[in-house]
Amino acid sequence: MKKIIVTGGAGFIGSNFVHYVVNNHPEVQITVLDKLTYAGNKENIAGLPEDRVKLVVGDITDAPLVENLVKEADAVVHYAAESHNDNSLKDPFPFVQTNLIGTYTLIEACRKYGVRYHHVSTDEVYGDLPLREDLPGHGEGKGEKFTAETPYNPSSPYSSTKAGSDLLVRAWVRSFGLKATISNCSNNYGPYQHIEKFIPRQITNILSGARPKLYGNGKNVRDWIHTNDHSSAVWLILTKGTIGETYLIGADGEEDNKTVLELILELMGQPKEAYDQVKDRAGHDLRYAIDSSKLREELGWQPKFTNFREGLADTIQWYTEHQEWWQAEKQAVEANYAKNGQ
Ligand code: NAD
Ligand code: DAU
């Protein structure tokens, strides 16, 4: 695999994957196809060797552009998406366009030219799980984490378009022999995440002298994984995964939002209660939890960044030292949330 296209390679997770491949696989050349929406930033892949990484600014729904790139490539790794649940509740249209039509455009091109395709998806396609406190045995029993066999049951416009895109890929594998794999990962954290998302929003609020905002009672649980671990898993699936298979990626990082927020406050030297409880998200998923045993047992993957406290401290340090990366957008992001009482 010498030439790969990484869609969304200027976003949070896609750019991490580009760095991962550049640092670990010197034989691979990367074309990043990215529209540079509000969530994409050239700076995320700045300074990488020009003979290894080329940025094409364009839309994944642009079929002639996509075909021209795909016919020269050995593989496509598809990260590009509209990725934020709150935005999808305000205006679902870009989610339908990018996540569904964009995926369709890419898999049609890969089918035509026989190109290997990896589809990056989310655990949110499975809907949510009850809180552990509401389960007999506190959630340690079978069927209490997501597996590749869990039925799809998405809650939001974002997650339903991601679910639809996964189903397109599955159908293209079965009906047209598309050489595809799918991965469904849990919540990522780390440097370069857009400040609309939970962890960077709270860190940058504190750095800006504003109070963090917790939706509802803060009991909702997310299964946190460091982006670097997501990237190593995707590379392994791309190169060693079985065609047609779905792999769940997670690092056993379940934490409720209130606990995460209190940890951020503590690490940033703030009182534990120095935050506002704001309006809850409509349709807010309660708990996500990933069973990643298939990925670990079949492909030998292991997460390396398993100390959440340390990972969070490093992330706080990164946002503290890179204020020029986020400051210009902060006011507009918060004004947008404020309109919604959040
Ligand atoms: P992000 O919003 O930070 O980045 C998305 C990137 O896609 C941006 O660079 C943007 O410019 C680009 N993009 C958007 N629409 C495009 C279009 N039409 N054409 C070309 N480029 C376009 O998102 P992220 O958090 O890095 O997520 C990346 C992928 O990983 C998504 O598919 C998401 O569903 C999936 N995922 C995210 C998480 C998470 O915790 N953030 C977890 C599991 C899976
Ligand atoms: O599970 C994977 C998904 O994780 C990805 O598919 C999505 O692309 C990614 O955005 C993320 O979705 P979430 O909705 O879980 O992430 P978000 O950062 O928006 O919110 C995390 C939790 O924090 C969620 O329970 C809502 C809550 N929250 C969020 C914000 C922005 C708050 O309490 N306050 C906030 O200000």
Image (tube, rainbow, N blue to C red):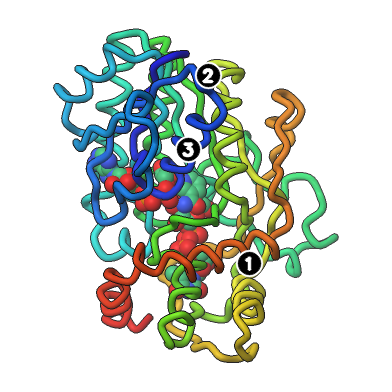
**What separation in Å lies between label 3 and label 1 (alpha carbons)?**
21 Å
**What separation in Å lies between label 2 and label 1 (alpha carbons)?**
38 Å
- Quarter of the image for the C terminus: give it: bottom left
Q: Which of marks 2 and 1 is nearer the N terminus?
A: 2
Q: In this view, does 276 lie to the left or right of 302?
A: left
Residue beneath the point at 62% across and 56% down: 224
Residue 75 x %, y %: 40, 18
Queried on whether the Cβ of the residue with tag 3 lies below 8 angstroms from ligand 1, the answer reads: no
Q: Quadrant of residue 86?
A: bottom left
Residue beneath the point at 49% across and 88% down: 276
117 in relation to 14, above or below: above
Queried on whether the Cβ of the residue with tag 1 lies below 8 angstroms from ligand 2, the answer reads: no
Q: Which amino acid does label 1 sit on?
A: Ala
**Of residues 59 and 285, which is closer to you in this image?**
59
Residue 253 x %, y %: 69, 56
Q: Name the residue under label 1.
A: 313
